Amino acid sequence: MKKSFMLLAAVIVLALAFVAWRQFPNDGVPETVGSSPDETPQNGGVVEVLFWNVFADESSTGVFLAKAAEDFMKENPGIKITVSGQGGYDAIAERLEAASAGGNLPTMAIIEETFLGRFHPIAADLSEYLPSDVIANYQPGLLASGYVGDKLYAVPFNRSMPVLFYNKTMFEASGLQTPPATWDEFREAAKAISDAERGIRGAGLCWDTDAWIFESILYSWGGDILDGTNKRVVFNDGGKASDIVKFFQEMKEEGTLFSPYDHQEDPWITVATEVLQGRACMMLGSNGMYSLYSQWMADAGFELGIAMHPSSGGTPSIATGGGNIAVFRNASREQKAAAGKLLEFLARDEYAGEYAVLTGYLPITKTAMNSEKLSAMLSEKPEYRTVIEQMEYAHRRPFTKNWKNMYGIIVEELEACLSDKRADAAEAMESASSACQKVMDENPD
Amino acid sequence: MKPGASARSPYILILPAIALCLIFSIGPTVMSVRDSFRSVDYVAGTDKFVGLANYRSIFTDGVFLKVFGNSVVFMFCSVALSVPLGVAAALFLNRNRFIHNLTQSVIFTPHIVSFIAVATLWMFMMDPGYGILNYALGLFGLPPLRWLLDPGTSLLSLVIVAVWKTTGFNTLIVIAALQKIPAELYESARLDRATRAGMFFHITLPTISPVLVFLVTTSAISAFGTFDIVKFMTEGGPRNSSNLMVYWIYRTGFLHFQIGRAMAGAVVLILFLSVVSAVNFALMDRRAHYQ
C-alpha cells in the first residue's frame, strides 16, 4: 500500500514538474526563432503556406484571396496556399500570441498595422524575400508602418484611411455646395443641416474601438499620440485631446451631433445606419467601406458623397489604418520564399487594382492605378480620387507593443465623454494620458 | 478486499481521473503561480523572474482595485439575492400539483439557456430607448435608467441578470432538500401548535442548512468567476464600472499581453475564493445540521 502511494505521489510530482516546466519555441533569443529554418514540412515536394486572414471566407476579401491563391497556385504548382479566415484583427492577435507560446505559427498573416509593434519580434525581414522593385512600388505612406528601423516586417494589403462620408442628397437639400475642409466648416455645415423637429443631425461620430477616428482627428488637429522617442504620451499636451473632445461634446449639446454611445448596439453600425438612413448627414469612416456604403445609400434613395478628412487648417495629417501582411520567422526558408512570391503576386497591378475596386480599400501600389478595373472605376466615380490623394498626408499610427492596452484606456474615456453628461473632457483626457504613460513606463518596448 | 483485487487497484483506478485533474486543473494552477512571479512574453520569447513586481503592480493599479471591489460587490449581491429567492421560491413550489411542477420547470429554464442568448435578451430589455424595463419604470412614474450604459447602474444590471439566471437552479436544489424532510416532524410541530414561522426556523432551515452551505459556497465561487455576461454585455465598461476579476485577467493576459500581471490577478482570485470558502464553511458548519 505504502509503495503504491509512493508511486502515485511520484507520478503526481513528475506530472506537476512537467506542466510547470516550459520552454519557449523561441526561448530568449528572438533572432534564432525557428531553430531549424531550413527544414521544410514537405508534402510530396509541395511547399505548404498557411495564410491567416482577418476576413471571413465568404466576405469579399475572403473570396478575393481564395481566387488569388488559386490563380497563384496554377502559376506555381510546387506551392500550396491555404487561406484561413480567423475572425478579425483582435482574434488573429490573440491566436498569434497563443501560437507563439505553442510554437505553431502560420507562415503568414494579415495583422492590423499597429500590431506590428507587438509582433515584429516573430516576423521575417521581407526585404530578403521580395525584389527591391516590388518594395519600391508600394505606396510609401502605406509601407511606412511595415518598417521597424531599416527592416521591412510587413507590407500593405487591406489598407485604409478615414474619409468624410456624407449624404449628398441631404447636403445639397440644405443649400450646401462643397463638403467641409476644416473642423470649423464641419461644425457650421452640421448646424445648417440639423433639424431638431425632424430628428435630423448634421453629423454622427464613432471614435472606433481602437480610437482610430480619434487618432486621426488628433493628427488633423496637429497633435500626436507619442513623441518622437515613442516613450512619452503626448496626446493631451497643451490640452489638445481635451479640446477635441470638448468640440464634439458641444456639438452634441447643440443637437448637431449624433452619438452612438447613447445606444447599446455596435457604435459603427449605429452611426452608419443614421447616416445611411438620412437621420444624420456626415461621418468619418474607413474608405474600405466605400463600395458597401454606396450600395446601401443608393438602396435608401440617397447619393453617397466622399470627401477628404477635415483638418484644422495647414497641411492635413490623416491616420492610416487597416491590415498589413507579415511572414513569420519560424517558417522554413522555402515557405518564406513562397510567401514572398505570393506577396509579389498580390502586388501586381491587376490584383492590387481589382482588390481596391472590389472593396474600396486603398490601391497599395503606385502602379495599381494603371489597372484597367481601377482606371474604369475612377472614370465612373471621380470623387474616389479624393481617397487616393489623401495618401500624401498619411500619418503613421503609434508604434508600441502597448498600443492595444492604451487605446482601450483612451476609448473608455472618449466614450464616457459622449455618453455621460457629467463627464469632464479635461479630466477624462488627463486621466487617460496618465494611465497610458503608466502602461508605457511599466512595459517599455 | 475482493478476490483478485490488489492494494494497488484503487490507485490504478483513480489514476485517469488524477491525470486529467493534473493536466487541466492543478497543472495550470501551478503554472499560474509560477508565472505570477515572472515577466513572460511569448512573442519576444523572454521569461525572467521578477519577484513580487507583478503583485506590486496590480495592488497599486486603481483599475485592478476597482475591479476587485466590483467582484466582491457582485458576488455579495448575487449570493444575497439568488439564495434567499431560491429558498422562497422552493417553499412556494414544494407541492405536487401540476401548476407547481410546471412553474418549477419554467424557473429552471434560464439555467439551461446559453449565456449568449440570455445576454442578448437582457440587452434588448435594458435598452434605454425601447427596452421593456424602462417602459415598466414609466408605468410607475419613474424616470428611465441607462442600465448598462451608466457607470452607476451597469454592475447592478449584471447582478439582475446573474440572479435571474441562477435562482432557478437554487430553487431546484432547495426543493430536493425540502422533499427529504420527514413529514412527521411537521405533524409533531403542528400538534405542539407551532407557528409556520416557528416550523420554518426550527425544522426547515436547520434541516436544509447543509444544502444552503453548498449553495452559498458554489454561488459565491461562480459569481466571483463570472466572465460571460461581462464579455458579452458590457466588456467591463463604462469606465470599468462593470469589470470583474476573470474578465480583467483575460483582458490583461490575452489582450494586453501582460501574462505575469494576469497570473498575479489569478492567484489573488484563487486565494480570495479559498478564504471565502473556508470562512463560509467554518461559519455555516457551526449552524448547519448534518443528519
Image: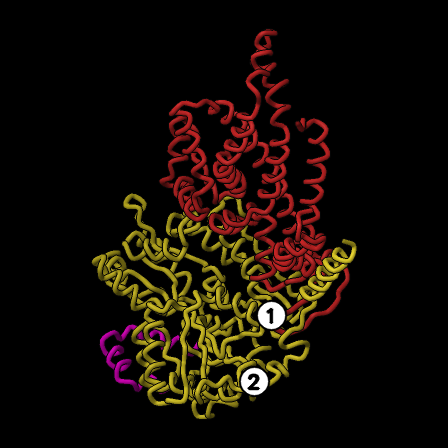
Mark 2, Cα crowd under 10 Å, few <14 / some 14-19 / many 20+, is some
Q: Quadrant of residue A170?
A: bottom left
Answer whether residue A378 is magenta in the image: yes
Q: Which residue is mark 2?
A: A151
Please identify, in this view, whether the residue under mark 1 or under mark 2 is nearer the observer: 1
Magenta-span inclusion, residue A187 = no
Under circle 1, the secondary element is: helix
Q: Give the chain coloured yellow.
A: A
Q: Which mark is residue B279?
A: none
Q: Residue at x 60, y 70 (%)?
A: A101
Instruction: Tell me the residue at 59%/21% (across/down).
Output: B204
- The disc numbered 1 marks a residue on which chain? A
Question: How would you classify the magenta stretch by its main secondary structure?
Answer: helix
The chain whose colour is red is: B
Check disc 1 and give the amino acid type.
Ala
Q: Give coordinates of residue A229: x percent, y percent.
A: 63, 74
Q: Which residues are magenta?
A: A367-393
Q: Is residue A78 left or right of residue B156?
A: left
